[in-house]
Amino acid sequence: MGATITSGSNPTNKWMMVHQGRRGSTVFFYIDAKLIGTFNSSTDLTNANAVLKIGTGQSAGNQNASQLALFRISASAPSEEQIEKMYNDEKFLFQENAQATLYGISDAVTALAFDDDTNLLHVGTSSGRSVFQGLKRVENTTDAVGSAISASNGMVADE
């Protein structure tokens, strides 16, 4: 789009959420859910022959050592509140020893229950029950879960 926005020196070896979007003719950039800049662009985005490059410069020799995770692309732009929620929900996934996966070796889910009172999701597998608060696993059991889980008001029953 022909514009560069800089926010000073960005730290290395640190997770950052970078978000670029466009609403109408306004292009915006966020780093860690903070707006760092905008510019206006009337560029037509309907070029069927355009090439999208992610994590690299425009020329073949212009590579960068960045790593990307959770890349998204959409026809619409999230609101400022949605960008902040994504940042707050996902930032812990990149902390050392983050627990964000099902407990054990099985990924075959046998039962699910959401407790509206505690806002916890209980996920059963043959390895046990994983308990999630948002994307973070906050607890687990090691007893296999059969075909049912019920959770309400902090009480959990599984089969």
Image (spheres, rainbow, N blue to C red):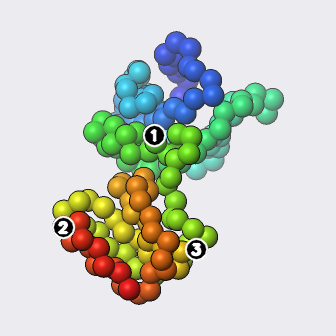
> Would residue 47 be visible to someone looking at this image?
no
Residue 71 in the image: state x and y as whole percent. Answer: 54, 46
Which residue was labeled with disc 2? 153
Which residue was labeled with disc 3? 106
Say if 95 sits above or below 116 in the image: above
Please indicate whether residue 23 sits to the left or right of residue 65 in the image. Answer: left
Which residue was labeled with disc 1? 91
Outermost right residue: 61
Crowd class of label 3 (few under 14; some 14 to 19; many from 20; radius 10 Å)? few
Residue 53 in the image: state x and y as whole percent. Answer: 65, 40
The answer for how far apart the CA atoms under marks 1 and 2 are is: 28 Å
Find numbered disc 3 in the image and state the secondary structure of the residue it sits on.
loop
**Residue that appears at 43% across and 30% down:** 32
Find numbered disc 2 in the image and state the secondary structure of the residue it sits on.
loop
Mark 3: amino acid = Ser
Crowd class of label 2 (few under 14; some 14 to 19; many from 20; radius 10 Å)? few
Q: Looking at the image, is mark 1 or mark 3 nearer the viewer?
A: 3
The answer for how far apart the CA atoms under marks 2 and 3 are is: 28 Å
Mark 2: amino acid = Asn
**Residue that appears at 44% across and 86% down:** 146
Mark 1: amino acid = Lys
**Which sits in the foreground, 93 or 8?**
93
Numbered tag placed on residue 143 in the rendering: none
> Would residue 60 be visible to someone looking at this image?
yes
